[in-house]
């Protein structure tokens, strides 16, 4: 009796997917490899054809580059996919008709129009996770009319056109929202999700932007129990002449619903000790009625001989705020 020499058939789907994704482009007959994976009914398929020289957000030199590869037609007929990741790999969204069990889509390093996103969300009825990385388009990110089933939404340093003004998502089941990118275009940023558990907001401090609307995110976005914000959220920004920054967080920042009923954890990264940062921290501590945990990471930039003494100074100042806690269960950790 002849023994089978096909050792790949007995491997788990996850390992087959990893093997194919690691094969260098020049050493593989990429379409045959994909056909092999589809034949063996993989549940996870990742195709990455990014030019590493284009992965530079500061210069945005990845914008308007054509995708390096086109998704083969045989993939569209595979009904067992649960996770699909396409990086610099173009596709025809209207052909996504057989992905009835697809739970996760990740797209990167290519243009993704709003109409494309809407088609994907409409055709893939089981979709729970949408991840966009280094994508670009000239549209508003306006999904207010849809009632999305998404539980996770991640936008990692995507670029929107200069005329984009709205970032609106209606996702009643959304649990996790991550946004990293520029903030100077959007006049409205609204995430409707009463089920939110965690939000991460990173507004890229290396860029100049208009940050007046940031405090409103506490009401419009932050309905979850955990909020992580970048240092830019806490820093001084360019303000109108009649704007009193010193009294902003006491006169204008009111007790939003999340501060009274849902927000239980706050992380503050790259703390530099500015007075505005102190005021924001004071706001969270004195208003956060159900807050359980606050973690503050002191910036390690520009290390000097005075680092230890400055570190102790800010620690002492924050420690003094403990007596003003709105929540007696609040634990404050400083690193």
Image: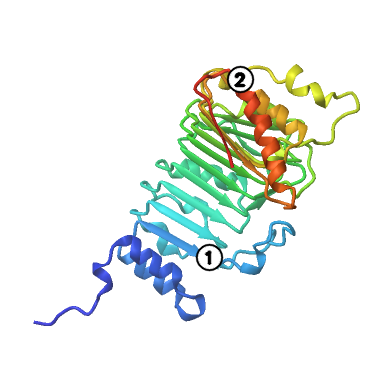
In x, y percent, where is residue 112? 60, 51
Q: Is residue 292 left or right of residue 191?
A: left
Is residue 44 depicted above or below 176 in this figure? below
Q: Specify the quadrant of the image occupied by residue 246.
A: top right
In x, y percent, where is residue 299? 68, 46
In x, y percent, where is residue 293? 52, 30
Q: Report helix, strand or loop for mark 1.
A: strand
Q: Residues within 10 Å of mark 1 (few under 14, many from 20)?
A: some
**Distance (Cα) linking label 2 and label 1:** 60 Å
| Residue 219 showing in the rendered view | no
Residue topped by disc 2 = 323
Is residue 306 depicted above or below 294 in this figure? below
Q: Specify the quadrant of the image occupied by residue 310.
A: top right
Residue shown at 54% from the left, 19% from the top:
327
Q: 274 or 5, which lies in front?
A: 274
Q: Residues within 10 Å of mark 2 (few under 14, many from 20)?
A: few
Residue topped by disc 1 = 70
């Amino acid at each position: 009796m002849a023994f089978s020499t096909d050792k790949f058939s007995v491997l788990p789907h996850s390992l087959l997917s990893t093997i194919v994704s690691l094969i260098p482009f020049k050493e593989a007959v990429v379409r045959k490899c994909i056909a092999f994976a589809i034949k063996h009914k993989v549940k996870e398929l990742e195709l990455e054809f990014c030019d590493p020289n284009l992965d530079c957000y500061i210069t945005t030199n990845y914008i308007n580059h054509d995708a390096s590869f086109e998704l083969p037609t045989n993939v569209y007929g595979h009904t067992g996919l649960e996770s699909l990741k396409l990086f610099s790999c173009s596709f025809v969204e209207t052909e996504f008709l057989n992905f009835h069990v697809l739970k996760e889509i990740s797209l990167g390093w290519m243009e993704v129009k709003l109409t494309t996103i809407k088609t994907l969300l409409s055709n893939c009825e089981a979709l729970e996770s949408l991840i966009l990385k280094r994508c670009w388009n000239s549209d508003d990110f306006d999904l207010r009319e849809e009632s999305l089933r998404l539980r996770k939404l991640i936008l990692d340093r995507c670029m929107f056109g200069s005329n984009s003004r709205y970032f609106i998502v209606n996702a009643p089941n959304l649990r996790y929202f991550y946004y990293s990118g520029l903030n100077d275009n959007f006049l409205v940023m609204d995430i409707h999700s009463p089920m939110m558990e965690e939000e991460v907001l990173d507004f890229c401090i290396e860029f100049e932007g208009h940050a007046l609307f940031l405090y409103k995110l506490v009401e419009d976005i932050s309905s979850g129990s955990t909020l992580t914000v970048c240092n830019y959220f806490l820093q001084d920004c360019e303000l109108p002449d009649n704007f009193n920054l010193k009294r902003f967080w006491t006169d204008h920042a009111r007790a939003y619903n999340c501060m009274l009923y849902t927000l239980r954890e706050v992380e503050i990264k790259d703390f530099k000790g500015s007075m505005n940062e102190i005021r924001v921290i004071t706001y969270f501590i004195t208003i956060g009625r159900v807050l359980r945990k606050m973690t503050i990471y002191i910036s390690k930039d520009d290390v000097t001989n005075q680092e230890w003494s400055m570190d102790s100074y800010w620690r002492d100042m924050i420690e003094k705020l403990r007596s003003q806690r709105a929540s007696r269960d609040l634990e404050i950790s400083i690193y």
